[in-house]
Amino acid sequence: MTIASDERTGAGAPGGHTDGPLSRVTAMFSGPAGRNLGLVFALLLLCVVGVITAGDRFVSFDNLMTILRLASVIGVVSVGMTFVITGGGIDLSVGAIVALSSVWASTLATQTLATDTHWIVMVTTALVVGAGCGLVNGALIAYGRMAAFIVTLAMMAGARGLAEIIAQKRTQVVTVSDFIDVIGGRVLGIPVLVIIFAVVAVAGWILLNRTTFGRRTLAVGGNPEAARLAGINVKRHTTLLYVIVGVACGLAAVMLLARTTAGTSTHGMLYELDAIAAVVIGGTLLSGGRGTIVGTVFGVLIFTTLTNVFTLNNLDTSTQAVAKGVIIVVAVLLQQRVAARNGSPP
């Protein structure tokens, strides 16, 4: 019996036998629907804990909007990261790219130009900077044949250093009021940041699951050599994946500028770890070849809700870090177990 590994197919029991209730349950939870069901259960469990420990403070509409606003920025980065990891890569520079994009988009020159013309100049600047960083990463990895870990590690150091130089280690206050009013505002009571995240998630899902680009991404991540023999330009496709995550970082920088009304080289600290963690617990394989945007969204919401519950209960950040670490380890172990059952590499 052949077992497919991408998110659109399920998985059978070992040896192709699916007899017995336990085997059927195991097979269900190893498939895409089962994985998402497990994430929903985990999120609901966190909500129950929040209700029990924080009561009305947790279930209030304002707190719900707070969770979604906090999830939106890292959520956009995580959607981009999903494409890179699905394609068999990794990007450790996303936090630094967010910082560089936010600083470049909030310089005096950029804001003056935005005031004289339109605030869209700031958005364009951030997106171009993010795309440029992604292009450099992708070109060095695909055409320079350098390890993704090394290239993005170098970008992480270089981009944050450049951000510090441009900002002169100062916080650059956003003075373009129209930009803050629009991006940081609300539509029918829903923060624009949340709407942007939702649009990005839907667009990412369509791109990964309903287009040739998405199928090629799965192929490249699953077996680059087989993808090349099938006629896919693996180098160009890999480069495009890093450009996508770079654009996502630029958009996240725009959202941070609107939320904090400031650009600084400290923006995006540890975003790379948060994004990778959300992608992994969402069900995307670190080895590539299987990716799920829906799972990533749930992963982001789980971590953000966990942080919110800890904050409402006045628990320190060290305890939060330990809890996140445990969740990541458990998620990876479950991935390896499911991959071993399916006869695919972990």
Image: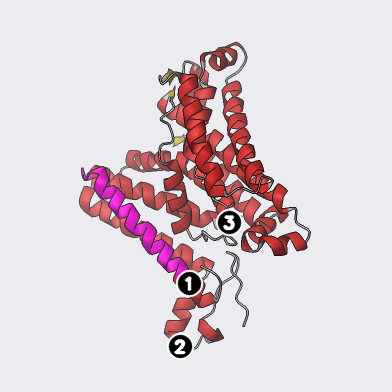
Looking at the image, residue 72 lies above or below residue 343: above
For the residues labelled 3 and 2, the Cα–Cα distance comes to 33 Å
- What SS does tag 2 mark? loop
For the residues labelled 1 and 3, the Cα–Cα distance comes to 17 Å
Q: Nearer the viewer, residue 136 or 117?
A: 136
Q: Which residue is mark 3?
A: 86
Q: Which residue is mark 1?
A: 338
Is 186 within the magenta? Answer: no
Q: Amino acid at mark 3?
A: Thr
Q: Give the tally of numbered discs.
A: 3
Q: Nearer the viewer, residue 99 or 200?
A: 99
Q: Amino acid at mark 2?
A: Gly
Horizontal placement of 54 versus 169: left or right? left
Graded by Cα atoms within 10 Å as few (under 14), some (14 to 19) or many (20 or more), the crowding at tag 3 reads: many
Identify the magenta region: 313-336
Is 332 within the magenta? Answer: yes
Q: Which residue is mark 2?
A: 20
